[in-house]
Image (cartoon, helix red, strand yellow):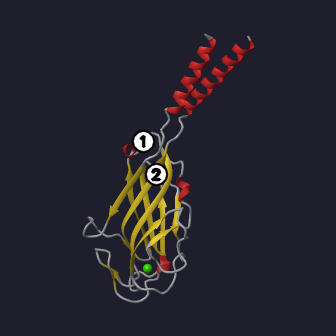
Amino acid sequence: MIRRLALMTLAIGIVVGGSLPASGAIITKLAVYTTPPGPGPLPIVDFSSDTRGLLVLASDFPLGELVGNVIVEIDLTKSAETINPDGTPVGGGNAFHAEVILRLISPESTVVSLVEQNTYSGAVGGVRRTVEFDDSAATTVGGGAIFNGTYMPVGSLSDFIGESPAGDWRLYFEDTGGGPGNPSPLSVNAWTLSIETSPVPEPSALAIWLILVAVGSAIGCCRRWK
Ligand SMILES: [Ca+2]
């Protein structure tokens, strides 16, 4: 009887432990500001800064899961003169790529630097580029003009790990020089936020599992001593 109780207790412990979620989910959010196809207006900064948000709802991911990984992709234009509503750079000359600052801010107000002033460099003309930031990329961003591709950001997107995905994720973008009379604008044409969530072992379930295993082991020991 005691042995049966011990085995039953262990079985219950395994079932409780095994009920934890097996894998995370991928949340993907996209905002497009170009016209067409987005609603506009195109956010343009020049010796100024701005932010845009993407909202993650609690219903977008399994209950209780937390941020496990973040990847952000930004479609941007840096121009030497003006930027059309469709994101096309207009005009020649130096677009001062070194002026670009990009940061991602979580709903819990954690700030991760993607690009800081002088991360990019070179006297290069206007470009429209799509840059993805991923901690697992092979190359760190910067060291020249803005190029398409996947890069490690200046900071670490892993700083978001363990936070709740729910809420307003904000992209901060700044252009550090020029302005009226000496234009060299930056626009964010679109951006995509991808968040992989991780299942969290429920402390209560884990505690129950450990207690049940301990009780089961103790009962087994008592049985052997008799
Ligand atoms: Ca500028």
Locate residue 211 relative to residue 130 in the image: left or right.
Answer: right
Q: Secondary structure at mark 2?
A: strand
Quadrant assignment for ligand 1 = bottom left
Of 226 and 131, nearer the camera is 226
Q: Residue 56, image x and y in percent?
A: 39, 50
Is residue 27 in sight in this rendering? Answer: yes
Q: Quadrant of residue 129?
A: bottom left
Query: What type is the residue that disc 1 sits on?
Result: Pro
Q: Which residue is mark 2?
A: 196
Which one is earlier in the sequence, the residue at label 2 or at label 1? 1
Q: Residue 226, image x and y in percent?
A: 73, 10
- Measured in 3D between alpha carbons, the distance from the residue under mark 2 to the one under mark 1, in whole angstroms, is 11 Å
Q: Is residue 9 above or below residue 201?
A: above
Q: Quadrant of residue 181?
A: bottom left
User: Which residue is located at x 56 percent, y 19 percent?
Assistant: 8
Q: Residue 95, image x and y in percent?
A: 43, 83
Q: Residues within 10 Å of mark 1 (few under 14, many from 20)?
A: some
Q: Secondary structure at mark 1?
A: loop
User: Which residue is located at x 39 percent, y 58 percent?
Assistant: 53
Q: Tell me: is circle 1 under 8 Å from ligand 1.
A: no
- Tell me the quadrant of the picture where the N terminus can be found: top right
